Amino acid sequence: MPRVVALRVDAVAAGVEDFYQSFQLKPERAAEIREGVLAELETERDQAAHDHARATHRLASLRPPELGSRSQLRLSQAVLIS
């Protein structure tokens, strides 16, 4: 059976911190990562804009005609659909 060695968490954390203080990405790799993150953010932003437009359109289609473009309903005007 292999021997189990117990280490204190703070000692392990200090070791990880020491390792990454000397760790550096090459500028080319950092640029690749930055470009990937920015592309992902743009995709997420585009999806959020699409979802917002779709939800806004859906909300407008559910609003009773007498309310027009008002954005809030009073409780007495609410209709439950089951």
Image (cartoon, rainbow, N blue to C red):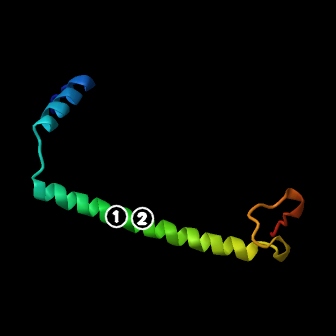
Write down the quadrant of residue 69 in the picture.
Answer: bottom right
Q: How many marks?
A: 2
Q: Residue at x 67, y 74 (%)?
A: 58
Q: Position of residue 72 (x, y in %)?
A: 77, 60
Q: Residue at x 54, y 69 (%)?
A: 51
Q: Residue at x 22, y 58 (%)?
A: 33
Q: Position of residue 38 (x, y in %)?
A: 31, 61
Q: Secondary structure at mark 2?
A: helix
Q: Amino acid at mark 1?
A: Glu
User: Residue placed farthest to the right in the image?
Assistant: 76
> In the picture, which quadrant includes the N terminus?
top left
Pointer 1 with pointer 2, Cβ within 8 A = yes
Seen from the viewer's position, the closer of residues 16 and 55 is: 55
Q: Position of residue 82 (x, y in %)?
A: 80, 69
For residue 9, above or below residue 28: above
* 75 with respect to 29 (left or right): right
- Measured Cα–Cα span from mark 1 to mark 2: 6 Å
* 53 with respect to 67 (left or right): left
Q: Position of residue 26 (x, y in %)?
A: 9, 52
Q: Which residue is mark 2?
A: 44
User: Residue placed farthest to the front in the image?
Assistant: 69
Which disc, if any, is residue 49?
A: none
Seen from the viewer's position, the closer of residues 50 and 68 is: 68
Q: Amino acid at mark 2?
A: Glu
For residue 55, above or below residue 17: below
Seen from the viewer's position, the closer of residues 76 and 19 is: 76
Which disc, if any, is residue 40?
A: 1
Q: Residues within 10 Å of mark 2 (few under 14, many from 20)?
A: few
